Image (cartoon, helix red, strand yellow):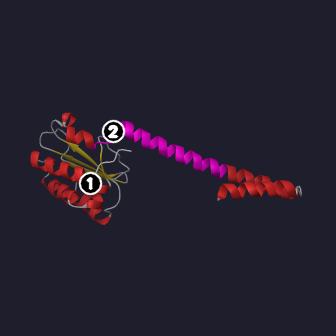
Amino acid sequence: MNWVSTTKKGDFLKWFLNHHQLKNKEARRLIEYIQNNHHILKNLSFIETVHPTERTIIISSISSDEAGFLFYANNMKTEEVSKALGSLINNPTDKVNLILHFFGKQANYRFKELVETRRLQSIKQYEQSEKDAKATDIVVEIALLKSQINKALDDRDEELFKALVGKLKEITN
């Protein structure tokens, strides 16, 4: 997993504010708030593509053709900085994504170190899918064992019953 220290994230945001003028003036206060809040920095991910179902903040400098400010949360979209700030104040430990648009970002090594690449996101999705598949396999195996236990009871097969109950105990412990 791509781990970036809160210090590195905060330093980059400071550099960004010192070197770029923002289209939306209120967005500066939002970045400063993020920069000064360790919990938010810890759960902040720099990304390049919008995730509308996740908390995602988009901020652009005046050198960008993109919108000055957008905030996505739970499939909702707003241009109000106050909504994003309120969300951060009320939920400082929840994950938040940040997309920055500024001239030269593709060549900026500071920015490149922070951005979670699509490849990393794909790896995270794959790992989560693997965990989900294993959990599903266990649920199916438990259901199958319970069905077999019921059949052993119906057939009055005490030996099979004990063996199946032993397997079930192994899986659920």
Residue at the image point whose x is 26% and y is 54% from the top: 6
Q: Position of residue 173 (x, y in %)?
A: 64, 59
- 3, 151: nearer the viewer: 3
Q: Position of residue 24 (x, y in %)?
A: 14, 51
Q: Position of residue 21 (x, y in %)?
A: 10, 47
- 105, 10: nearer the viewer: 10
**What is the magenta range?**
114-140
What kind of residue is marked 1? Thr
Mark nearer the viewer, 2 or 1 = 1
What kind of residue is marked 2? Thr
Residue at the image point whose x is 75% and y is 57% from the top: 166
Residue at the image point whose x is 60% and y is 49% from the top: 136
* Earlier sequence position, callout 2 versus callout 1: 1
Magenta span contains residue 131: yes
Which residue, given by chain and number where applicable, does mark 2 sit on? 117
Q: CA distance from mark 2 to mark 1?
A: 18 Å
Q: Position of residue 147 (x, y in %)?
A: 76, 53
Which residue, given by chain and number where applicable, does mark 1 sit on? 6
Image marks 2 and 1: residues in contact by CB distance under 8 Å: no
Q: Residue furthest bottom?
A: 90
Magenta span contains residue 96: no
Q: Categorize mark 1 by other alpha carbons within 10 Å: few (<14), some (14-19), many (20+).
A: some
Q: Secondary structure at mark 1?
A: helix
